[in-house]
Image (cartoon, helix red, strand yellow):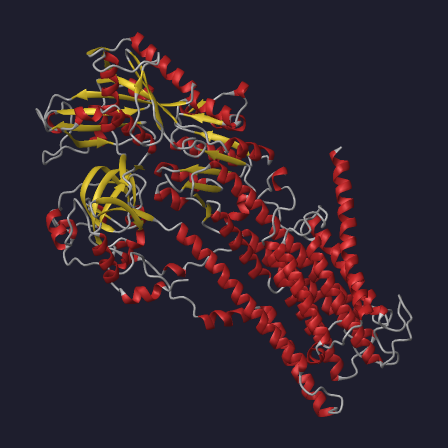
C-alpha cells in the first residue's frame, strides 16, 4: 500500500492564496491563481501544481512499520500460552539435564520446534494480512471519488485527489465538492454543509464578493471540501486543497476511528472463546483425573500434566482462523469487483447472500441506457426519427413512411419541440475525431437529455436558437419532474424566453396555450384529452415521454417579470424559489417518445433471482404504463398482473395500507425519493433484507437506509456512491443478481472452512482427551510405570495445525459453487453461521477422526483393544514413538480427507471432486511435508517421529479414509431425511 504519510510530510500545506477568497473578486482570484476561468488549467500546469502542492487529501495516520506488523502476529493469548509452554518445557529440560543427564535430550527440541512453528505461523499471518490489505487497497482505488474539472478548455473527469489549486470545478446536483473553491458561476445552486457547519438546511450560493469576512455558514460565494450539491449547477476556482481546506483544518487523524467488528467476526470471537472455555474445563478434568488415578510423584509428572493442558489448548483453537476469514472475504470481494460489483466494505458480503428483495430503478439498470428519440408527437401529427445511439445522423419520416417535407406544419412543430428540448438541457454531445477521419460521439451528462440534443441535431433544429444564451435555470428535481431555462435572444431584441421540458402530464398542467399548425391558440379540454391519450399510447409501447413547452416573457430582464421578487439591493432573488412566477402560462409545443430497450440479459437474471426466492421490485419515475410494460417484458410481473402503483396513490395510504401494498405490488411509477425511502422501510418492517439502487442525490437516504445500498458507477452521483455499500461499475441489474450469487458462494466457502477447521480441531482435542483417559485400555502406558503418557506431543499438534489449517482452508475459501446456491431461500441475517446442524456435523467428524487415530495408534502397540501384536520389537518407548507417528500421520491424512468432505454439508465429496485445483495443490503440499517430517532423521528427533514402512503408510491412509466414508454416510442420511420431508 502506498505511503500517504510521506506525501503529507512533503506537502504540509495546499493553499497558495494569502487573501480570503470570499471577499475577493473573481478576476482577482483568477489572476492570483494564474488561471483562465473559461479554459481552466493546462494538463501540464495541473501536473506541476500537483507536484508542488501535493495530493488533495486529508492527512492520514502513518502506516504501521513492517517489523511492528510482524511482531503484532504474536499479540494473541494463544501465543502467550504457547510461549508459556515453551518456558515450562525449557525448565523441564534443564531440570532433566541436571538430575538425569544420561537420559536427557541433547537439546531442548520441544522448545526449538514450538518457537520455529510460532515463527512460521507469524510469517503466514503476516503474509495473509498483507494480502488482505492489498485487496482492500485495490477496492479503495476502484471506489475513489472523481470530480469534473475544466482543463485545456474541456470538461474532464479526474480523481479527486488530483485536483489542484487553480482548477476550475464543474459542479452539479449530487456532486461532492472536491476542495475549497470560489464560485464563478451559479445556477440555482444549493449545498448541504451540515458536515462542516452543522447547518441542516441547504445553503443558497451566489458569485458576488462579500463585503467582509463572514463565518463559514455565511460564505455564500464559496464551496467547501466534503460538502454536497443538493440542487443546481455552477463553476468554481479551487483556492485550497488537502489539509489547507476548512475540512482539513478541523479534521482528526482519519485512521484514529476504531473499526467495528462485523457480526461474523464477533461470532468467530464467541466460538473461539467457547472453545477456550471448553478446553480449559477438559484440561482441568483430565489433570484432576490423572492426579486421582495416577498421582503426581515427581516434578516431571506435574510438568507433563501442564504440557498436556497446553497440548489440549493447541489442539482446540484454530490459530489461523481470523486471518483466513479476512483473506477469504477480501479475495471474494476482489473477485466480485472483476465482475463489476464493487463492494466497499468486507462486512457487506455477509448481507449480500441474505438479500430477499432487490429494489431497482428502471433506466440504465434494467434497461440499456441507450436513449434514442424515436418519435415526436405534436398537435398536427407525429414524426418518426431513424438512427440509434448518439451519432446525430438520421431522417424524419411520417407515419405513412414518407419523408417529412420542409415547411409543413408538422415539420415546424417538430423543429420547435426538439429545439426547446435541446435548450432546456444540461447534457452535452461531444465529438471525437479519429486519425482516420471517423467520428465517435460521447454522451456527457444524463443520457435522456443528450438523446434530445441528438434528435435536434438530426433535424437541424438548433439553427433557430443560435442567438440565445442562458440567463437562469430552475433545475429538474425528482419532486418537480420538470426543468425550466430562461434564455435571452442576443441576436434580436434581447427579450427573454422560458423553455421547459419534463413529464408531459406534469408540464401540461402549466400550459394555457398550444402551438398548432404555426399558430398559438388557447388550449382546450379536447387538446388535453388528446395529448393524454397519446401519452398513454406511447407509454404502453414502453416509450419514455418528455413534454416540451415555452413562454415568451416579453421583457429584457428577470427583474421586469411581473411578480418576481427582488432583494434589498434590487437584485433578483433565486428564481428556483420563484418557480411559480416563471412556470405558468406555458405554450405546449409537443412531446418526444424515447426508447430505452431492456437489457437482454436482465430477464434471465430476474428469473434467477425468483428461483433464489429473491423478489425484484421496479421503482421508476416513468409513466405507469411504461413501467408496467417493461416489468412484464422482464418477467418482474405476470402479463395478467401488470399493476403499477403511482406516487400519488402511495401518498394517500396509511402505514397499514402501505405495507399491504408493498407486500404484493412489485412495480411503482411516478415516484419521488421519499417514496423510495418509505418503500424500503416498509419492506424491512416485513422482515426483508432489502437491496436498493440509486443514482441521484435524492436517492441517497433510501440507499443508505437499505440493508444493501447499491449506487450506479456510471450515472451515480458522488453523494449516492458515498452512501452505498456497493457500486455497480456497469449500472446493470444482472450484476446485482450475480453479486447476490457470489455473496452466497463466499458465505458458503466461509462455512466450508469453518466446518473443516473446527471439526479437525475437535478431532485433535478428542484424540488427546480420550487418549489420556483410556491410556491403560489402549495400551499406551507401560505396565508398572507411573506418570502421564500423552498420545500426541504439543509440537505434533502444532505441526498438524500449521500443515492442515492454512493452505487447505484458504483453498476452500476460493472454492467454486458446489451446491446450487440460487436454489434455496435467502439466509436470514439473524441466522448463526455455525448452527445446530453444523455443530452436529463438526462433532460427528471430530469423533470419527479421534476414533480412527486412536485405533491406528492402538494397532501399533502390543495389547489394547484392537490388536495384540507381539512382533513389533523394541522397547515400550520405541513402540510409543511408532504409535505416535502412526496417530500423527493418520490425523494429518484424516484432516486432508476432511477437506474434501467439508466442501458441502450435504452433497457428496465426489461431486466436482477435481474442480478445485488449489485444494488439491494444498493436499499434495501437506502430504509431502508430512512425509518429510516422518522420514528425515533430524526432524524425527524434533517431532518425536520415526520412519514408517510401506505397509504402515497404507494403514494410515486406509484408516484416515474412513473419515471420508463416515462423512459420505452421514450426508446420505441427511439427504434421505430431507427427501422424506420434501414428500
Q: Residue furthest left?
A: 493
Answer above or below: position of 897 versus 677.
below
Asked whether 351 or 650 is in front, the reply is 351
Residue lying at 53% horizontally and 44% vertically, measured from the top left: 352
Q: Residue furthest front?
A: 436
Is residue 633 left or right of 114 when viewed as pictured? left
Answer above or below: position of 108 versus 618.
below
Answer above or below: position of 478 versus 81.
above
Q: Quadrant of the C terminus?
A: top right
Q: Position of residue 71 (x, y in %)?
A: 51, 72
Q: Position of residue 242 (x, y in %)?
A: 28, 57
Asked whether 236 or 370 is in front, the reply is 370
Residue lying at 71% horizontally and 46% vertically, measured from the top left: 906
The quadrant holding residue 447 is top left
The quadrant holding residue 859 is bottom right
Residue 276 appears in the rendering? no
Residue 142 appears in the rendering? yes
Q: Position of residue 431 (x, y in %)?
A: 27, 37
Q: Quadrant of the N terminus?
A: bottom left
Is residue 471 left or right of 9 when viewed as pictured? left
The quadrant holding residue 304 is bottom right
Amino acid at each position: 500500500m502506498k505511503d500517504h504519510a510521506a506525501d503529507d510530510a512533503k506537502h504540509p500545506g495546499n493553499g497558495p492564496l494569502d487573501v480570503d477568497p470570499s471577499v475577493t473578486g473573481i478576476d482577482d482570484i483568477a489572476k492570483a491563481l494564474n488561471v483562465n476561468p473559461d479554459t481552466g488549467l493546462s494538463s501540464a500546469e495541473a501536473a506541476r501544481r500537483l507536484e508542488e502542492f501535493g495530493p488533495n487529501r486529508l492527512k492520514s495516520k502513518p502506516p504501521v512499520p513492517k517489523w511492528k506488523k510482524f511482531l503484532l502476529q504474536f499479540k494473541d493469548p494463544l501465543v502467550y500460552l504457547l510461549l508459556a509452554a515453551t518456558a515450562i518445557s525449557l525448565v523441564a529440560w534443564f531440570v532433566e539435564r541436571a538430575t538425569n543427564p544420561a537420559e536427557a535430550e541433547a537439546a531442548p527440541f520441544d522448545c526449538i520446534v514450538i518457537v520455529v512453528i510460532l515463527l512460521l505461523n507469524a510469517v503466514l499471518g503476516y503474509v495473509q494480512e498483507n494480502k488482505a490489505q492489498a485487496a482492500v487497497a485495490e477496492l479503495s482505488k476502484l471506489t475513489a471519488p472523481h470530480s469534473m474539472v475544466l482543463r485545456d478548455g474541456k470538461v474532464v473527469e479526474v480523481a479527486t485527489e488530483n485536483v489542484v489549486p487553480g482548477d476550475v470545478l464543474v459542479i452539479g446536483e449530487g456532486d461532492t465538492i472536491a476542495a475549497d473553491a470560489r464560485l464563478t458561476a451559479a445556477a440555482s445552486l444549493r449545498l448541504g454543509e451540515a458536515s462542516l457547519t452543522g447547518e441542516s438546511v441547504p445553503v443558497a450560493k451566489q458569485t458576488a464578493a462579500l463585503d467582509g469576512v463572514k463565518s463559514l455558514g455565511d460564505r455564500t460565494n464559496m464551496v467547501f471540501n466534503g460538502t454536497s450539491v443538493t440542487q443546481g449547477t455552477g463553476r468554481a476556482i479551487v483556492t485550497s486543497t488537502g489539509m489547507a481546506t476548512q475540512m482539513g483544518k478541523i479534521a482528526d487523524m482519519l485512521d484514529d476511528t476504531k473499526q467495528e467488528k462485523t457480526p461474523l467476526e464477533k461470532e468467530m470471537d464467541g466460538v473461539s472463546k467457547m472453545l477456550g472455555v471448553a478446553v480449559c474445563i477438559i484440561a482441568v478434568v483430565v489433570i484432576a483425573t490423572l492426579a486421582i488415578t495416577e498421582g503426581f510423584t515427581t516434578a516431571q509428572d506435574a510438568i507433563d500434566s501442564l504440557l498436556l493442558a497446553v497440548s489440549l489448548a493447541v489442539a482446540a483453537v484454530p490459530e489461523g482462523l481470523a486471518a483466513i476469514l479476512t483473506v477469504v472475504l477480501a479475495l471474494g470481494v476482489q473477485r466480485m469487483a472483476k465482475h463489476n460489483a464493487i463492494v466497499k466494505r468486507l462486512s457487506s458480503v455477509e448481507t449480500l447472500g441474505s438479500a430477499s428483495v432487490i429494489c431497482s430503478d428502471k433506466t440504465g439498470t434494467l434497461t440499456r441506457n441507450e436513449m434514442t428519440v424515436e418519435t415526436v408527437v405534436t398537435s398536427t401529427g407525429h414524426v418518426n426519427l431513424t438512427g440509434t445511439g448518439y451519432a446525430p445522423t438520421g431522417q424524419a419520416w411520417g407515419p405513412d413512411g414518407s419523408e417529412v417535407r420542409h415547411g409543413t406544419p408538422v415539420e415546424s412543430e417538430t423543429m420547435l419541440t426538439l429545439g426547446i428540448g435541446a435548450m432546456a438541457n444540461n447534457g452535452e454531445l461531444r465529438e471525437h475525431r479519429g486519425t482516420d477521419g471517423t467520428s465517435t460521439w460521447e454522451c456527457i451528462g444524463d443520457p435522456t437529455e443528450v438523446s434530445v440534443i441528438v434528435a435536434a441535431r438530426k433535424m437541424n433544429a438548433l439553427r433557430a436558437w443560435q442567438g440565445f444564451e442562458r440567463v437562469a435555470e430552475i433545475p429538474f428535481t425528482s419532486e418537480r419532474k420538470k426543468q425550466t431555462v430562461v434564455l435571452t435572444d442576443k441576436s434580436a431584441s434581447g427579450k427573454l424566453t422560458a423553455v421547459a421540458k419534463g413529464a408531459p402530464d406534469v408540464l401540461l398542467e402549466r400550459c394555457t396555450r398550444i402551438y398548432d399548425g404555426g399558430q398559438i391558440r388557447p388550449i382546450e379540454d379536447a387538446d388535453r384529452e388528446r395529448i393524454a391519450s397519446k401519452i398513454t399510447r406511447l407509454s404502453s409501447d414502453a416509450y419514455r415521454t418528455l413534454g416540451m413547452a415555452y413562454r415568451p416573457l416579453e421583457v429584457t430582464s428577470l427583474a421586469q417579470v411581473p411578480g418576481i421578487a427582488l432583494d434589498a439591493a434590487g437584485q433578483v432573488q433565486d428564481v428556483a424559489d420563484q418557480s411559480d412566477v416563471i412556470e405558468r402560462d406555458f405554450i405546449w409545443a409537443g412531446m418526444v417518445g424515447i426508447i430505452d430497450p431492456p437489457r437482454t440479459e436482465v430477464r434471465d437474471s430476474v428469473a434467477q433471482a425468483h428461483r433464489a426466492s429473491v423478489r425484484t421490485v421496479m421503482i421508476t419515475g416513468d409513466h405507469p404504463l411504461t413501467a408496467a410494460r417493461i416489468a412484464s417484458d422482464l418477467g418482474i410481473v405476470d402479463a395478467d398482473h401488470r399493476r403499477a402503483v403511482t406516487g400519488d396513490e402511495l401518498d394517500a395510504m396509511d402505514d397499514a395500507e402501505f405495507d399491504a401494498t408493498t407486500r404484493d405490488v412489485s412495480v411503482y411509477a411516478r415516484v419521488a425519493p421519499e417514496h423510495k425511502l418509505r418503500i424500503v422501510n416498509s419492506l424491512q418492517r416485513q422482515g426483508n433484507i432489502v437491496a436498493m439502487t440509486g443514482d441521484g442525490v435524492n436517492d441517497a437516504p433510501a440507499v443508505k437506509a437499505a440493508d444493501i445500498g447499491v449506487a450506479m458507477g456510471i450515472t451515480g452521483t458522488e453523494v449516492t456512491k458515498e452512501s452505498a455499500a456497493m457500486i455497480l461499475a456497469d449500472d446493470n441489474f444482472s450484476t446485482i443478481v450475480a453479486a447476490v450469487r457470489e455473496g452466497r458462494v463466499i458465505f458458503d466457502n466461509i462455512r466450508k472452512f469453518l466446518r473443516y477447521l473446527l471439526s479437525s480441531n475437535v478431532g485433535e482435542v478428542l484424540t488427546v482427551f480420550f487418549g489420556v483417559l483410556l491410556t491403560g485400555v489402549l495400551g499406551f502406558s507401560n505396565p508398572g510405570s507411573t506418570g502421564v503418557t500423552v498420545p500426541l506431543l504439543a509440537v505434533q499438534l502444532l505441526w498438524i495445525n500449521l500443515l492442515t489449517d492454512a493452505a487447505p482452508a484458504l483453498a476452500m475459501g476460493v472454492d467454486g459453487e458446489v451446491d446450487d446456491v440460487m436454489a434455496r431461500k435467502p439466509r436470514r441475517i439473524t441466522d448463526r453461521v455455525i448452527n445446530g446442524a453444523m455443530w452436529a456435523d463438526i462433532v460427528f467428524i471430530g469423533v470419527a477422526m479421534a476414533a480412527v487415530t486412536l485405533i491406528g495408534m492402538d494397532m501399533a502397540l502390543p495389547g489394547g483393544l484392537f490388536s495384540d501384536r507381539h512382533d513389533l520389537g523394541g522397547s515400550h518407548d520405541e513402540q510409543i514413538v511408532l504409535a505416535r507417528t502412526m496417530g500423527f500421520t493418520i490425523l494429518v491424512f484424516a484432516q486432508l480427507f476432511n477437506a474434501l468432505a467439508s466442501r458441502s454439508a450435504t452433497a457428496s465429496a465426489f461431486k466436482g471432486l477435481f474442480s478445485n485445483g488449489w485444494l488439491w495443490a494444498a493436499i499434495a503440499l501437506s502430504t509431502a511435508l508430512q512425509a518429510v517430517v516422518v522420514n528425515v532423521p533430524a526432524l524425527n528427533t524434533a517431532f518425536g517421529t520415526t520412519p514408517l514402512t510401506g505397509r504402515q503408510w497404507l494403514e494410515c491412509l486406509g484408516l484416515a479414509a474412513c473419515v471420508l466414508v463416515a462423512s459420505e454416510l452421514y450426508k446420505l442420511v441427511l439427504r434421505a431425511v430431507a427427501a422424506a420431508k420434501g414428500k
